[in-house]
Amino acid sequence: MVAVGWLFALVLLLPLGFEVWPQLDSMRVWGIPVSWLAVVVVPFPAMVFLAVWQLRRAERPEDEA
């Protein structure tokens, strides 16, 4: 349940961050707006991390038995 909460926070806070910092649209890295890069670079690695973390948490009781 904790991993789902973090995933929800990630999905909710990313657009909220764009609303709070609109200058991310005008900043560019390699000609690409930072806001676009954040949509690709932030969520997917974070989701992989959350999936691995949740998997390890789920397997921990099995390993102790």
Image: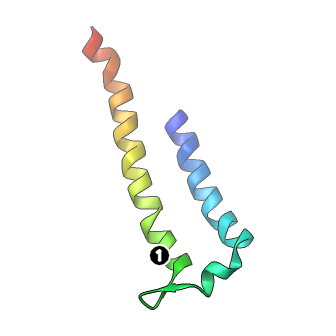
Residue drawn at the location 34% of the way across and 34% of the way down: 55
Viewer-closest of 5 and 35: 35
Residue 64: % across, % down:
28, 11
Measuring from the top left, give residue 24's x and y in whole percent: 62, 79
Q: Quadrant of residue 44?
A: bottom left
- List the single residue furthest toward the bottom: 31
Q: Is residue 30 left or right of residue 56?
A: right
**Relative to residue 10, is residue 60 depicted above or below?**
above
Counting from the top left corner in percent of width and height, residue 38 is at 50, 70
Question: At 60% from the left edge and 63% from the top edge, which residue is drawn?
Answer: 14
- Measured as percent of width and height from the top left, residue 21 is found at 70, 73
Tag 1: Cα neighbours inside 10 Å, few (<14), some, or many (≥20)? few
**Front position in the image: 13 or 24:** 24
What is the quadrant of residue 65 in the picture?
Answer: top left
In the rendered image, which residue does mark 1 sit on?
37
Left or right, 59 with respect to 39, comes to left
Residue at the image position 66 percent from the left and 65 percent from the top: 17
Location of residue 61 with respect to 59 vertically, above or below: above
Q: Image quarter for residue 13? A: bottom right
Three-letter code, disc 1: Leu
